[in-house]
Image (cartoon, rainbow, N blue to C red):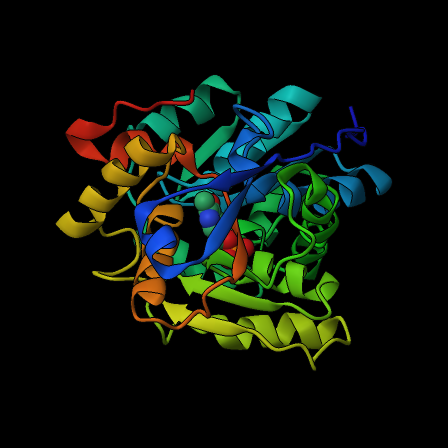
Amino acid sequence: MPIQIPHWRPEAPLQKLTLPWLEAAGVELACLRLDLVDPLVSGNKWFKLAPYLEQAAAIGAQGLISLGGAHSNHLHALAAAGQRFGFESVGLLRGEVQQTPTVDDLQRMGMQLHWLGYGGYRARHQPDFWTPWLARYVGFQVVGEGGLGLQGARGCSCLLAMAEAQLADIGWPDFDAWWLAAGTGTTLAGLLLAEQRRQVFGAQAVPSGHGVASQVATLLNEAGASGRSFQLIEAARAGFARLDEPLHQFILETEQASGVPLEPVYTGKALMALRDFCKSGQLARGSRLIFIHTGGLQGRRALMGASADYTQV
Ligand SMILES: *Cc1c(COP(=O)(O)O)cnc(C)c1O
């Protein structure tokens, strides 16, 4: 059965966040909680996925096929959307067969899984990579790794209006800047397509040299918006998806102080980078920022080790 367009436009709540280092710097922060839009179809991945789903429905696709790692937030959101909205999903996984909590969920949510090994996964950018998969899964729509692409970006542009609509609720006449984690930079690019005047900071969860800046520039170019400026902040610390002890401590302390759950790959690193930015006096006193909580909490279970007491699934 072809995919139906899901008529679901979730709104993420905007909440004020108080933490001692924010007060010390005289900075006010509000958090746009994309992690709260749904327990399963969660975070920025839903917003990146929505335009692909609409396109898939418009062309009468039979299902969606994508790829990712054994902790992938993207595959998790795709599988959950498939289960929720009744379409088939296929996930091509990096590496050798392993059973992570994420993989358990993908199977339970009915996603067809194929393990590509590492070499097989590296071949994903080759022009004929998808041919055998689309011969096997006829009529399926391909979604790029992590929802990368202009379509994915466009799905995130609504975050600006979503936050602005809630400013009065938290007593803010306006705010000065955005702060969010960047992996592929798709979410950042989507925000920039809508944001005309405020500063946008992207805390890079991948080491510099992974091309985030050029990816964002390419997306903006494709959209005819190449003039937009943004600032990337180094936040990868020990490397992508690596958890060091100061980060571990920061996450536990911040969760306890704020009540907002974080995970170590993106949101924990992004917020810690903001703390360091505040501490080094780079934000004027009286600044108001919105931090986008991009979700990813399903990955927290496997990645926080013994302290993984917060589980959302
Ligand atoms: C995927 C992901 C990101 C990165 O988003 P991009 O659009 O690829 O930059 C940030 N935060 C979380 C929790 C994610 O899962």
Whether residue 284 sits left or right of residue 156 in the image: it is left
The residue closer to the viewer here, 57 or 168, is 168
The percent position of residue 312, horizontal first and vertical second, equals 42, 22
Quadrant in the picture for residue 89:
top right
Q: Is residue 206 above or below residue 256?
A: below
In this picture, residue 137 sits left or right of residue 234: right
Comparing 139 with 277, the one in front is 277
Quarter location, residue 107: top left
Horizontal and vertical percent for residue 28?
A: 49, 52
* Residue most extreme to the bottom: 227
Residue closest to the far right: 58
Which of the two residues, 139 or 181, is positioned nearer the viewer here? 181
Q: Position of residue 57 (x, y in %)?
A: 81, 37
Asked if residue 48 can be seen in this view, the reply is yes
View extreme (top): residue: 108
Work out which quarter of the rendered image holds the N terminus and state it. top right
Q: Residue at x 39, y 50 (%)?
A: 266
297 vs 171, left or right, is left
- Return the x and y of residue 176 as percentages of the image width and height: 60, 64
